Image: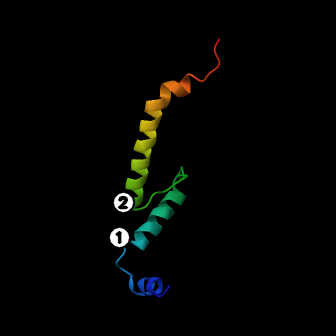
Amino acid sequence: MGATRAFVETGGGTQAGDPAKAAAAVLAALNAEETPLRLALGDDSIDTILMHLEMVRGDLAAWEKVGRDTKLDG
């Protein structure tokens, strides 16, 4: 716990994201005409989500015929 406490106490300004910019992005999303269901902030979250979407798209494409063939005949 000591290492975590030391990081929190001394880590200000070393994080990749800017808290003020994050807060502004949240406010912009909340004030938007169409508020997003999800708001990814930061390169790491956006990159991770895009990678996940590519994997899901690949799985769907690979198994699309099998999935579509489960409908009732006739």
Could you say which is closer to the camera, residue 2 or residue 35?
A: 2
Q: Which label sits on residue 16?
A: 1
Callout 1, which amino acid?
Answer: Ala
Q: CA distance from mark 1 to mark 2?
A: 9 Å
Callout 2, which amino acid?
Answer: Asp
25 in relation to 74, above or below: below
**Residue 37 place in picture, x, y as percent:** 55, 52
4 in relation to 59, above or below: below
User: CB under 8 Å between callouts 1 and 2?
Assistant: yes
Residue 18 placement, left or right of 27: left
Residue 17 placement, left or right of 31: left
Q: Residue at x 49, y 56 (%)?
A: 39
Q: Quadrant of the C terminus?
A: top right
**Mark sitting earlier along the chain (1/2):** 1
Q: Which label sits on residue 55?
A: none
Q: Residue at x 37, y 74 (%)?
A: 15
Q: Residue at x 43, y 87 (%)?
A: 6
User: Which residue bears the numbered disc 2?
Assistant: 43
**Residue 63 place in picture, x, y as percent:** 48, 30
12 in relation to 35, above or below: below
